Amino acid sequence: MHTSGLPDTEHLAERAREALARCGVDRLREPVGAAGTARTPVTGGILFPVEFDTAASAERAVAAAHAAFPAWRDTPAPVRGALVRRLGELLREHKGDLAELVTIEAGKIRSEALGEVQEMIDVCEFAVGLSRQLYGRTMPSERPGHRLMETWHPLGVVGVITAFNFPVAVWSWNTCIALVCGDTVVWKPSELTPLTALACHALLMRAARETGAPDDVHRVVLGDRSVGEALVDDARVALLSATGSTAMGRAVAPRVAARMGRYLLELGGNNAAVVAPSADLDLVVRGSVFAAAGTAGQRCTSLRRLIVHEDVVDEVAEKVVAAYRQLEDRIGDPFAEETLVGPLIGERGYTAMREALDRAEADGGRVLVGGARRLEQDAKDAYYVEPAVVRMPGQTEVVRRETFAPILYVLAYRTLEEAVELHNGVPQGLSSAIFTRDQQEAERFLSSAGSDCGIVNVNIGTSGAEIGGAFGGEKDTGGGRESGSDSWKAYMRRATNTVNFGGELPLAQGVRFL
Ligand code: NAD
């Protein structure tokens, strides 16, 4: 397919093959049973066929990771860290190749694709440090001659299911931490991004060979939800860490719970920023435009609602619209230097965006800018859109749901209580922000009576979290925490130990027996 303003699909396929080869993927897998394809949202075209897994081959991957677990569990944690250190070096060496694949498969602009790979490198560094810091506590025992303490042990096989929009970073949040914690991993990436997964897996396998880690410390299985379900239902998967839509989380959680497995869910967001009258409005505009239109609105932390004080709402809306107009000639080929907004992942995202805009208008909303499709003549199967800003009279049902596309709803408020009520009045609870110069207001938003989200920011947008903090959200976002801080604890099991070094056997709580 030739497309005038966009690269050729054949050309992208060639670039993908070359990047894969440089990462050590020389052939696209042994046949395991199911025919799949790699696609690119840049043109909407099919790149080439890729062998997908079946439920049976996924089961074999779990069995292999399960068999590798005891040896990995018994490897000292700092030695496990050496594997992740080597992976970090290889990711750094292949940063350009991996970013290339992220752009081809997920449509991210070059700078964001490079940023996503950098995030993996950062996580490797964090995890290597962590490999010497898997600390347990020692607590004072109430009994004389006793010591009370806790130790953290590896869990087993961790199943990692990831979404298309962070095809590699979310894998690293889970895998680098799980590996230093002594777990083995089976990864099912999104069916929309199999190539980035094959490249990461190949680099990790090279690191494993070079550092003497067991071969099956990591397996990748490709395919859609049916392959994911093989991980969900397998009792040997001690922890299932799943990232994706709330609908996916609702399907997965009860099944894992039914077999008494553990799950860690990172689901959809509907993130908002409150703009107080004292806010620095230029900061608001810069922070909001990146958060709402960056990654074409396809981040779980994308800004979807701007809740603005009534005294400044018109001015803020006007400034945001002006900034969006500047984006209009920067929508297109994500490889082009000047592009800021790449494609949506596919038709599904575009249809959801159109339906949401129609619904918002029917609810009395006014589209202030954007919403039109672009480059349709160049590539009929690619979905480029102008990011949209919609002024809403209230927080209707369409505003309360996550539409995974670049729509920013603007709502007005009068008092901070009202702003917080609007803010928290959605089912999701991932990321949030307040723009204000009033310290009391900022503190109230940060307090337990303020934002109900897992991420709460002041004078910065909702997206673009650093890896050092725990990442995740509440309510329909699923409650999981990944990446930094003490998120590692989800990947280990805790044992509480009481050691009696005295000659007596006193019972706790003063109980007497014999
Ligand atoms: P999706 O739910 O369609 O798919 C996510 C993954 O789950 C894919 O690998 C898919 O194959 C798998 N899957 C779907 N149903 C399954 C089932 N029943 N059993 C097992 N596996 C199943 O999501 P998507 O369209 O790829 O990604 C977008 C969504 O992900 C958005 O809602 C976004 O907010 C969310 N997301 C959340 C985070 C976070 O950290 N909170 C990060 C990225 C994306």
Image (tube, rainbow, N blue to C red):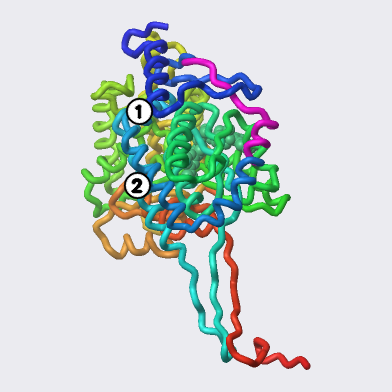
Quadrant housing the N terminus: top left
**Image x and y of residue 242, in percent:** 56, 43
* Amino acid type of the residue tagged 2 in the rendering: Asp
Q: Nearer the viewer, residue 491 or 180?
A: 180
**In the visual, does 241 lie left or right of 328?**
right
Which residue sits at x=41%, y=54%? 484
User: In the image as oriented, which residue stretches furthest toward the top?
Assistant: 2
**Image x and y of residue 267, in percent:** 53, 44
* Amino acid type of the residue tagged 1 in the rendering: Asp
Tell me the quarter of the picture where residue 369 sits.
top left
Q: How many numbered marks, from 0 up?
A: 2
Stretch in magenta: 47-62
Tell me the quarter of the picture where residue 332 sits.
top left
Q: Compared to 79, does 163 lie above or below?
A: above
Cα–Cα span, label 1 and label 2:
17 Å
**In the visual, does 58 lie left or right of 141?**
right
Which residue sits at x=28%, y=30%? 324
The residue indicated by pointer 1 is 97
**Image x and y of residue 205, in percent:** 47, 37
The residue indicated by pointer 2 is 122
Q: Say whether mark 2 is within 8 Å of ligand 1.
A: no
**In the visual, does 254 lie left or right of 129?**
right
Q: Compared to 411, does 56 lie above or below?
A: above
